[in-house]
């Protein structure tokens, strides 16, 4: 038995006939924040989609607490304890904050009111705007709502795709603060970030993806200090 919370082992995969992931292996351990970085088109979002059952691996395994989940339907993966915050369209703009949270909990069999109540305690800004339409929120607030939606199921793994995309630097810092706060409540986080320096800055470990496979991996500090990683992928 592996003690990784989540593991992709030797995964090939992609879209239709188009191969994107090429013998890709990575893992996430209990309580970690792990950051995936790499150029546009490297396959970072494809990794998250494959881990969440939106794509079926062609080869290899997706393991959750050592059990195969590769190709399981997303709604079943959610019930297992994995949440996903996609990069775009991660809230319903025409629904209220409260309705968005309820939708996040449709797969919950019990304890929905309590779970939502805890989220309102945790995210004051959502509490104050329960009845507002999600489209009236700022970009940063919308990202917080997207996290909260995924947290209604109280996952022990959260997959987050580019939480800071399109946000002003200060707002991005707030959002990274929320990522850390979520992690501190015992949720392991696998996060894709375009802003590699900031993403690694809040992470324990990182992987550099290029052309669908892992080129570098290590502690976040180690990657930030690595000359080659810095030159090739951090714009330094
Ligand atoms: N729905 C799709 N159908 C076909 N190809 C796709 C699709 N989504 C992404 N791709 C291709 O897969 C590759 C990896 O994409 P992606 O995982 O989104 O990269 P990243 O998130 O690292 O920028 C790219 O070449 C992209 O064009
Ligand atoms: Mg992407």
Image: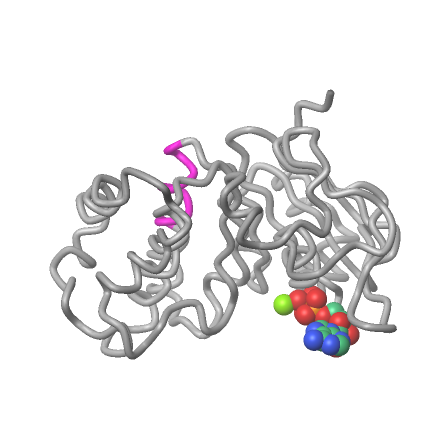
Q: Residue at x 35, y 49 (%)?
A: 178
Percent of width and height locating residue 35? 60, 49
Residue 41 visible to the viewer? no
Can you tell which quarter of the image residue 114 is in?
top left
Quarter of the C terminus within the rendering:
bottom right
> In the figure, 182 relative to 59: above or below?
above
Task: Give the residues in magenta.
Answer: 177-185
Name the foreground residue: 40 vs 186. 186
Magenta-span inclusion, residue 180: yes
Describe residue 183's horizontal placement relative to residue 82 as left or right: left
Q: Quadrant of ligand 1?
A: bottom right
Judged by its main secondary structure, the magenta piece is helix
Q: Is residue 183 magenta?
A: yes
Residue 52, position as x, y percentages in the image? 61, 53
On the rendered structure, is 101 left or right of 126?
Answer: right
Q: Residue at x 29, y 79 (%)?
A: 94
Farthest residue toward the left? 128
Q: Quadrant of residue 206 in the image?
A: top right
Q: Residue at x 27, y 73 (%)?
A: 95
Query: Looking at the image, which residue sits at the far top?
Result: 1
Q: Is residue 217 left or right of residue 180?
A: right
Give 85 or 217, whichever is nearer the viewer: 85
Position of the N terminus by quadrant = top right
Asked whether the viewer can see residue 23, the reply is yes
């Amino acid at each position: 038995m592996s003690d990784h919370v989540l593991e992709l082992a030797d995964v090939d995969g992609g879209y239709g006939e188009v191969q994107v992931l090429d013998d890709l292996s990575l893992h996430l351990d209990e309580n970690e924040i792990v950051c995936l970085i790499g150029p546009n088109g490297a396959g970072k979002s494809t990794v998250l989609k494959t881990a969440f059952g939106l794509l079926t691996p062609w080869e290899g395994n997706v393991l959750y607490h050592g059990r195969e989940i590769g190709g399981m339907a997303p709604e079943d993966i959610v019930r297992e304890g994995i949440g996903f915050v996609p990069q775009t369209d991660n809230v319903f703009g025409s629904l209220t904050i409260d309705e968005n949270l309820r939708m996040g909990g449709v797969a919950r069999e019990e304890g929905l009111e309590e779970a939502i109540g805890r989220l309102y305690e945790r995210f004051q800004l959502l509490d104050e705007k329960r009845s507002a339409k999600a489209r009236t929120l700022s970009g940063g607030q919308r990202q917080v709502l997207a996290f909260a939606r995924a947290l209604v199921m109280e996952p022990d793994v959260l997959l987050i795709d580019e939480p800071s995309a399109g946000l002003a630097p200060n707002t991005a810092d707030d959002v990274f603060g929320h990522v850390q706060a979520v992690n501190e409540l015992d949720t392991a986080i696998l996060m894709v970030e375009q802003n590699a320096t900031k993403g690694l800055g809040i992470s324990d470990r990182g992987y550099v993806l290029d052309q669908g496979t892992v080129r570098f991996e290590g502690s976040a500090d180690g990657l930030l200090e690595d000359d080659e990683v810095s030159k090739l992928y951090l714009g330094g």
